[in-house]
Each structure stands twice: as C-alpha cells, then as structure tokens.
Amino acid sequence: MTPRATTSTLAWPAITVGDRLPDLVIEVTATRIVAGAIASRDFMPVHHDRAYANSQGAPDIFMNILSDTGYCSRFLTDWAGPEAMIRRLAIRLGVPLFPETVLTYSGSVTAVRAEGDEGIVEVELTASTHLGDHVTGTAVLSLPLG
C-alpha cells in the first residue's frame, strides 16, 4: 500500500482545475475484502466464501460497494487533509475486485469555487486494476477558505 501521511489540510486558494491527485495504490487481499464486508455488516457470502462465490459464477470472493465507498473517501481525504469534508460522492462500479489484485486510485480537480465561508472542490476519480476500471466517480469536497 502507498504510505501517505497528510496531517495538514490543503490551502484551498492553491487548488486549480486540472490538478492531479496523488495516486493511492492498495494491494487487495482476501483478508482486506472480508474485513471490509464484516465491518460494513455485509454478510453476503460472495464477499467471504470462495465456494459460494464460485457457485455464483465468480472466480473468487470480491469487494463490496460499502468498502469501495470507504476507500474512495480515504483517497479524497488523504489528499485534501483532515479539515476537508466530503459533501457528495457518486460512484459507479465497473469490473469486480478480487483478491491478489493491485488497485490504483487516480483523480483530478474539475472545478473550484467559493460558497460562503467554504472552498468547494469538485473531483473526478477512478480506481483501476489490470482488468479495467473498478470504480469511477465524482466527488464534491469543502475546505476552509482561510
């Protein structure tokens, strides 16, 4: 996994349209998939039982959408910092995410504007594997103006 330690919030005035977010690379294991399903109380067997996933036509267990939402949020807040608030996150699932896969998040800023005492930043994001795009989406974050 990509080590990252963001301890300060980005300065909103320094963000411009076209800025690229630093990639986040996650090595996906069966343990990570099962732990995410359990933590989000998703007990559907395709997320923890390989034989059941196989009986449903999948080659292995696969990540659930609640875990994907959590990792998308992490990708955004790792970049923006601890004072950033995710106001909206809209994602679409693509190819399944199986164990022993490398998942790479990337993104870019598509819009910036001030609203009241907040700096609003819009972002497009993608999380891809060797099979293709696993998640695509958009997000709106707010940051302090000062």
Image (cartoon, grey):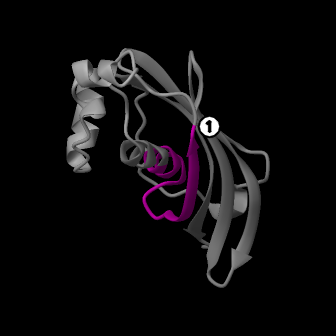
Residue found at the far bottom of this picture: 116
Q: Secondary structure at mark 1?
A: strand
43 lies left or right of 143: left
Work out whether residue 49 or residue 128 is closer to the camera in this orientation and state it.
49
- When the figure is inspected, residue 3 is found, relative to residue 11, above or below; the finding is above
Mark 1, other Cα within 10 Å: few <14 / some 14–19 / many ≥20: many
Q: Residue at x 58, y 56 (%)?
A: 90
63 or 128: nearer the viewer: 63
Residue that carries the numbered disc 1 in the rendered image = 126
Q: Residue at x 48, y 54 (%)?
A: 81
Q: Is 35 one of the magenta-colored residues?
A: no
Instruction: Answer left or right for 125 relative to 58.
Output: right
For image coordinates 57% across by 18% down, the residue present is: 131
Residue 28 vertical placement versus 45 (above, below): above
State the image coordinates of residue 67 (x, y, percent, origin top left): 37, 43
Residue 88 vs 65, above or below: the answer is below
Q: Quadrant of the N terminus?
A: top left
Type of amino acid at the residue the image marks with label 1: Thr
Q: Which residues are magenta?
A: 73-93
Could you say which quadrant of the image residue 22 lies in? top right
Which quadrant holds the C terminus?
Answer: bottom right
Location of residue 54 by image quarter: top left
In the image shown, does 118 or 125 lie closer to the viewer?
125
Task: Return the x and y of residue 49 as percentages of the image width and height.
Answer: 21, 26
Residue 61 position in % (x across, y down): 32, 24
In the picture, measured across the screen, residue 136 lies left or right of residue 54, that is right
Hey, which quadrant is residue 12 in on the image?
A: bottom right
